[in-house]
Amino acid sequence: MTTPYSSAPMETTPTPLMSAADCGDTQLQESFVHILEEGLVTPQYQPIVNLVNDGLVGWEGLIRGPKDTALESPLALFALAERLGHLRDLERLCRERTIAGADLQPQEKLFLNIHPRTLTDPTFREGETRTLIETRQLRADRIVFEITEHQAIDDYALLRRVVNHYRKQGYQIALDDTGAGYSGLVTLMEVKPDVVKIDMNLIRRLHEDQTKQDIVRAICQVSSGFGAVVIAEGIETPEELAAVRRCGVPYGQGYLLGVPTHRCRVQPLDPPGLFG
Ligand SMILES: [Ca+2]
């Protein structure tokens, strides 16, 4: 991070607390390298549901590190990867595992979380994902890349170019965690994604909060202006689901609608596909 004081001499004498932290950190780094080398990540899949006809429209791929370890949480795993400069390596491994493990019905899409910096990284090999999906006989239009709003880079011109680049190849782009940060609507209007995922904190107790309802409606209105599909994340109670429907959100995700599972659950329904 650049600060006015960045050229000032750094404190070089570690405190005992820092030394202890560094020691734990070394173990954590070794665990991370082991995870990467041995491919010790597990994909899970959470359903995305059409709230109008209850049909299943897709699955978000979620990643877990080794069970009962400090790196089981994807947040911890990805934060460490970023710090160690291995974000792309971890993302590639997660993408491989998630695509390989997905068992999609013909109308379903697979949502893959990807760091915007990976998308904009010139060394990110475009053909990587295509090769992976072709081995599963999937076309690019079955894949939606989710980029999270609070990681969205502030070079909007670059991000727009990248989004358009992937769109031309047939992929779709979702803006994840929309409404979580102050820049939410600005990012939304600048990026104009194909899919908008409303952050779970806006959905939590939505039925009791008029301001949240107004924000959710505003996101729907802005999104419909450029033809984006809206998904409410983190729906956990029937009251929240009813409020989401009242606000006009057509798609949903959350524990009430389905928990993440190791396999894509086969549905007896044959719902119409997402986005036509
Ligand atoms: Ca996501």
Image (cartoon, rainbow, N blue to C red):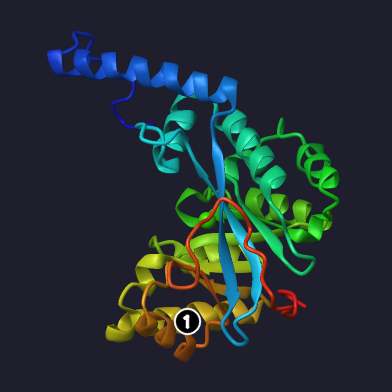
Above or below for 247 versus 20: below
Q: Residue at x 52, y 60 (%)?
A: 176
Residue 141: horizontal and vertical position, in percent? 79, 60
Q: Quadrant of residue 60?
A: bottom right
SS for dot 1: helix
Reply above or below: 44 against 244: above
Name the residue beneath numbered marker 1. 218
Q: Callout 1: 10 Å neighbours few (<14), some, many (20+)?
A: some
Look at 74% across and 78% down and name the residue there: 270
Extreme residue toward the left, this view: 16
Q: Position of residue 91 (x, y in %)?
A: 60, 37
Residue lying at the far top of the rendered structure: 13
List x then y, in percent, for residue 256.
Answer: 43, 72
Left or right, 177 with reference to 95? left
Q: Amino acid at mark 1?
A: Ala
* Quadrant location, the C terminus: bottom right
For the residue pair 40 and 247, the one nearer the viewer reads as: 40
Counting from the top left corner in percent of width and height, residue 266 is at 67, 65
Which residue appears at 63% of the width and 75% of the height? 229
Please say if 273 is above or below 80: below
Looking at mark 1, is its residue's CB closer than 8 Å to ligand 1?
Answer: no
Task: Tell me the quarter of the image containing the N terminus.
Answer: top left
Left or right of 198, for residue 173:
right
Q: What residue appears at the point 50 percent right and 67 percent down from the top-left corner?
A: 258
